[in-house]
Amino acid sequence: MESGRMIHWLNLVACVLLLLKAEGSLVPLTLVENALSKGAVCLDGSPPAYHFDKGAGEGVNNWIVHMEGGGWCKDADDCLGRKDTRLGSSNQMVEDLYFSGILGNEREYNPDFYNWNRVKIRYCDGSSFTGDVEEVDPTNKLYFRGARIFSAVMDDLLAKGMDKAENAILSGCSAGGLTTILHCDNFKSLLPSGANVKCVPDAGFFINVEDISGTRFIEDYYSKVVSTHGSTKNLPSSCTSKLSPGLCFFPEYVLSHISTPIFIVNSAYDSWQIRNILAPGAADPSDSWHSCKLDLSKCSHDQLSIVQGFKKEFEKAVSVVGDSSSRGMFIDSCFDHCQTESQETWFKSDSPHLANTTIAKAVGDWFYGRGSFDQIDCNYPCNPTCQNLVSDLKDHPGI
């Protein structure tokens, strides 16, 4: 009986491994050692890193550069909490990372980008790659050098063939999605003038809205992030000349200053934003929102009404995308956070759909000019293609 169970278990493991092999691949870590001489280092002073899967065939001169997410840190104590983790040190990063979704290497699962050069840049600075403070506090030995990391990694990729790019996408998830927005024009400026360069931020459209206590918690938080990391000089000056630097960390205030084509992928009920912007712990000392924040089906009538109000605020904020053909958006009503990295939400038969279209098809059609896409979903829980999984957000720390 025991041997039979063991054989059954081994068969299940084998099936899972075969499925993973079919839908994606493991890609090794590359350390950018020469970044050390430029002071382009993680919070702990270790070198930055990325994972790189080379393109082939017709995709050999096409590039996707995907920025990892993982929140931010607003002050020295906050950043010290990340310093000895993968979000603050390349010494703590895994050697091999699984690529799937927009980074997948199989045509069946990533039809438009499977044979491109696909890169995932690891996140270890806590500022969405905007920080640059020369001084290092001798007591905490923290380095705030996110903008330098971005430049150093780009230099490394340019030397590996990205300087010959014909098509390129800067993408990213969560804090990496915000990086994509903030660095979109910068990325384009690094590539050949004739290249087709566009940006696809995923779950990076964080909005400036009151929380359930009536406080703009996220506005104060972003202001502290920008101040701690010395980010102002790396935000669009056309924005910071009119608004406080902290506000220029919000996509709704900087998007009008971006000229590169951009496609926003986001949920109007983003699970991270519901948990950390709408109902952060500081605004809910009694923890009455605990169940609702994990699963919208557990919200009370009054809580769901507030959540629907958040969606209205999101729609208002994202309206700055406008109706230009160079821009697009896929804003679904799924209770989710980051949908381009996961095969389940990027491109499968049961992936989320808007206008009978998957995220992968919407992005691919827009990038190649096969069609425009500019859709905002109906109100939760209207979309039957949403998986609306219980939110754990283990890879995206709260604030």
Image (cartoon, rainbow, N blue to C red):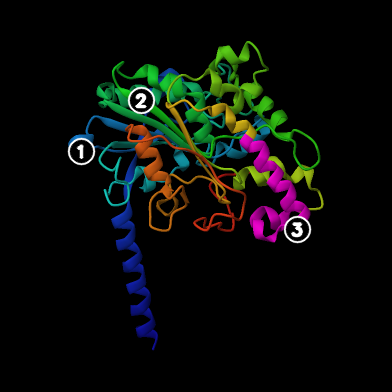
Dominant SS of magenta comes to helix
Q: Secondary structure at mark 3?
A: loop
Q: CA distance from mark 1 to mark 2?
A: 19 Å
Q: Nearer the viewer, mark 1 or mark 2?
A: 2
Please say if 251 is above or below 314.
above
Please state the horizontal and vertical placement of residue 158, each as a whole percent of the image. 30, 23
Please state the horizontal and vertical placement of residue 144, each as a whole percent of the image. 56, 24
Residues at circles 1 and 3 in contact by the CB criterion of under 8 Å = no
Which quarter shows the C terminus?
top right
Q: CA distance from mark 1 to mark 3?
A: 52 Å
Please say if 344 is above or below 367.
below
Q: Does the magenta portion include 293? A: yes
Tag 3: amino acid: Ser
Q: Does the magenta portion include 340? A: no
Residue sitting at x 38%, y 16%: 189
Tag 2: amino acid: Val
Residues rendered magenta in the picture: 289-315
Between 262 and 13, the one nearer to me in the picture: 262
Residue sitting at x 54%, y 35%: 204
Tag 1: amino acid: Ala
Q: CA distance from mark 3 to mark 2?
A: 45 Å
Between 79 and 305, the one nearer to me in the picture: 305
| Other-residue count near label 1 (Cα within 10 Å), few / some / many at <14 / 14–19 / ≥20 | few
The mark tally for this picture is: 3
Q: Quadrant of residue 213?
A: top right
Residues at circles 1 and 2 in contact by the CB criterion of under 8 Å = no
Q: Which residue in the structure is indicated by mark 1?
A: 56
Q: Nearer the viewer, mark 1 or mark 3?
A: 3
Q: Which residue in the structure is indicated by mark 2?
A: 197
Q: Quadrant of residue 90?
A: top left
Residue sitting at x 30%, y 28%: 167
Q: Which residue in the structure is indicated by mark 3?
A: 300
